[in-house]
Amino acid sequence: MRIVGVACLSVLCAAVLVACAPGDSETDKTARQVAAESGSLPQTSAARYARKALDAIHASSPSFAVVEMRDTPSDDPEAATMHLVFRVHHDGSPDELFPEKPVTACYDVGYNFRGLVREPSRRDCPAGATPLDPPPIPLREVPDGFDPALQSVLTGLPATVTDNDVLAALTRSMPGPRSVKTPEPPPAQDVALRGADVGVAYRAGDRTTYGTDCLLGSRVQGATLVWRPEWDRVQSGEVPCTAKTALDR
């Protein structure tokens, strides 16, 4: 009977977050909240998810740390390919009726290029682990102000245009750098014509290092459309960020 009991307990510990590894409801709550926030916007490396996790907890809290981060590439689009270990400390409570002891808990968390794919699960803390401080995430994006500006350019083009007409209109009307002191690399611009139809693409970042941010716009048969394709479809290459894609809609 003792052997059966030990076996059942092992299964229980593996099956639920609140089982045998150290932790309590407060550390569980913190781990879940940070995992959800850091995984809400897809990233392209474990280090970038770690930076998002620390930013989510304001990075200055001594009660939270990322103590491990690793990338494990996979051909399976559903697999967790970026892994973090959170360490969360709860001071406990001196309440006379329901005192709570201090506890330090660690959690495995899994992400991929779509975001959070494995909720935090308790584990033993790695021996001798120290807090990691990953670098800030480089800003590589097509700014929000590009959407209305591109819509205005496409709408205002004459019925018959040349490449030079479109390029001149974009140069006049699209936003410039947002910061003079720390200028950001401008988004790459692509223009294509098909008769009187016009396609424009703006691309920032890249699929392997930063992730690609993409803005597409086209005027097809007189109708103008500006949109941002789904992030994961751009990263996978299913939707190329090109002017031809904009023309094909």
Image (cartoon, rainbow, N blue to C red):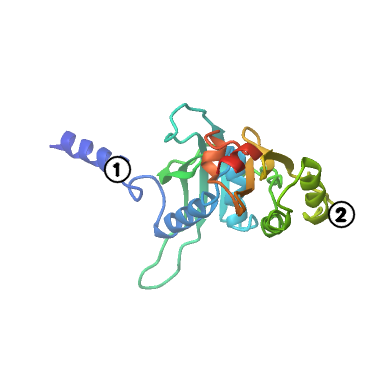
Residue at 45% x, 66% y is 93
* Residue at disc 2, secondary structure: loop
- In the picture, the quarter occupied by the N terminus is top left
Q: Quadrant of the C terminus?
A: top right
Badge 2 amino acid: Val
- Report the front residue among 15 and 20: 15
Marks 1/2: CA distance? 53 Å
- Which residue position is annotated with label 2? 180
Q: Is residue 3 visible?
A: yes
Residue drawn at (42%, 71%), measured in percent from left and top?
95
Residue that lies at the very extreme toward the left in this rendered image: 1
Image location of residue 139, percent across then percent down: 71, 47
Outermost residue on the right side: it is 181
The kind of residue tagged 1 is: Ala
> Crowdedness of circle 2 by 10 Å Cα count: few (<14), some, many (20+)?
few
Q: Closer to the camera, 106 or 231? A: 231
* Between 167 and 205, the one nearer to me in the picture: 167
Q: Position of residue 97 (x, y in %)?
A: 35, 72
| 109 horizontally vs 57: left or right | left
The residue that label 1 is drawn on is: 15
Location of residue 81 in the rendering, given as x and y in whole percent from the top left corner: 49, 34
